[in-house]
Image (tube, grey):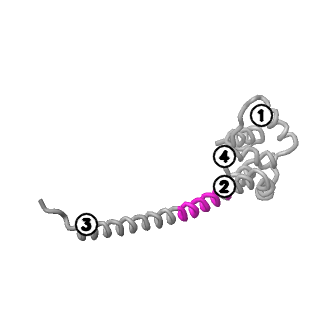
Amino acid sequence: MLKPNSDCLHSRRIIMEARMDDLERRLKAMEANNAENFKKLFALLSAKVSQSENKIASDSGEGGSNFCLSVGKFSSEDPVGWITRAEVYFCVQHTLPELRVNLAKLCIDGDVLKALIEKEGEGKVITWEGLKHWLLKRHGGRSE
């Protein structure tokens, strides 16, 4: 039986160790690259979340004054015009459906607001579509 040459084994061992060192170096580089990519991704996601939070805050808070400036106070003399302006505002601003009624209530006052609050007090959930229908039924105009 032939014995492997110790020089040959030693050479193979050195080559294998070099390959292992190279693999370990590549793995560490990949880990560092992945960590950097994760940081970038996290920063992008954080920015998107922040934008979404600002959009929601704008629509529900400060955006309320923008809504009323854009749409005007509700007028029982022109409910169709007011609803149309509100629809355009909601579309352009990408306003979430669940915020539309509360934004609309910021621009409704007097007897109309009082009647709306009483309607809500009856335990009925009012959607934007329902509010439009109610306003048109109460103040004239066509309900789609």
**Disc 3 versus disc 2: nearer the observer:** 3
Segment tinted magenta in the rendering:
35-50
- Estimate how packed mark 2 is, as few (under 14), some (14 to 19) or many (20 or more) residues with alpha carbons within 10 Å: few
Residue beneath the point at 77% across and 49% down:
78
Q: Which one is nearer the viewer's eye here, 130 or 138?
A: 130
Q: Which residue is mark 3?
A: 9
Query: Which mark is drawn over residue 120?
Result: 1
Spatial CA distance of label 3 from label 1 is 87 Å
Residue 80 position within the rendered picture, expressed as x and y whole percent measured from the top left? 72, 49
Spatial CA distance of label 4 from label 1 is 17 Å
| Sequence-first tag of 3 and 2 | 3
Amino acid bearing label 3: Leu
Spatial CA distance of label 2 from label 1 is 29 Å
Name the secondary structure under disc 1.
helix
Spatial CA distance of label 3 from label 2 is 63 Å
Residue beneath the point at 66% across and 55% down:
52
Residue 12 vs 98, above or below: the answer is below
**Type of secondary structure dominating the magenta stretch:** helix
Name the secondary structure under disc 4.
helix
Q: Which one is nearer the viewer's eye here, 79 or 33?
A: 33
| Sequence-first tag of 3 and 1 | 3
* Relative horizontal placement of residue 29, taking residue 82 as reference (left or right): left
Q: Which residue is mark 2?
A: 52
| Sequence-first tag of 2 and 4 | 2
Amino acid bearing label 1: Glu
**Disc 3 versus disc 1: nearer the observer:** 3
Spatial CA distance of label 2 from label 4 is 15 Å
